[in-house]
Amino acid sequence: MTPRPPGSGLAVRPMRDADWPAMWEIVRPVLRAGETYTVDPHLDEDAARDFWCGPPSTAVTVAEAGGTILGTAHMGPNRGGPGAHVANASYMVGEAARGRGVGRALVLDSLERLAAQGFESLVFNAVAASNRGAVRLYLDLGFTILGSVPGGFRHPREGLVDLHVMHRALR
């Protein structure tokens, strides 16, 4: 469990099977909104759990405070073979917990975990430019935008927006 600043009450720890129902309450609305992930927004619960918790993820974590799960992350190799030293990760924060440092805690925890697992860097393959809070957070934490796919994401309200490829060294 990664400790957080005193008084925050926020901790990040590995997911337990019993956490899934609370995680589903975060994952379902994020997917259904169709605003951030390049996956089918209508995944059923089993498919969503496979997407979030199954391979290639090597770790799934939750951020919790006072026994309430506020967000989750999954991480693992971006590719196999000669590319397996580069990690990939994704994050979801419950709507009520946004803007309270939960996403930052999840990202910082994943950076530590991935470095400890021997990964050299972390890449995000598809960050929707319309996900402004996430883009700001990642830039603030030292990620760079390597490039963008013009109009690569069909946002339900904003239409076609760019998809950023973002990267940060872990060593």
Image (spheres, helix red, strand yellow):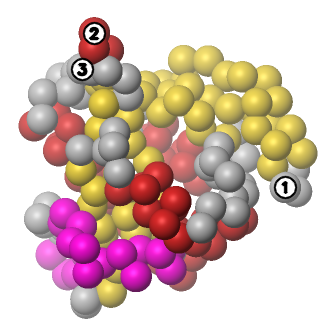
| Residue indicated by mark 2 | 82
Numbered badge on residue 103: none
Residue 84, given in percent of the width and then of the height, sits at 27, 20
Crowding near the residue tagged with mark 2, few <14, some 14–19, many ≥20 C-alpha atoms within 10 Å: few
The percent coordinates of residue 54 (x first, y second) are 35, 51
**Which residue position holds label 1?**
156
Instruction: Classify mark 1: residues with Cα within 10 Å, few (<14), some (14-19) or many (20+).
Output: few
The alpha-carbon separation of the residues under discs 1 and 2 comes to 37 Å
Q: Which of 132 and 95 lies nearest the eye of the viewer?
A: 95
Name the residue carrying label 3. Answer: 85
Farthest residue to the bottom: give it: 66
> Which sits in the foreground, 93 or 105?
93
The correct choice, above or below, for 122 with respect to 17 in the image is above
* C-beta proximity under 8 Å, tags 3 and 1: no
Q: Secondary structure at mark 2?
A: helix
Q: Is residue 112 above or below residue 73?
A: above
What residue range appears in magenta?
6-26
Q: Is residue 86 magenta?
A: no
Percent of width and height locating residue 160: 86, 38
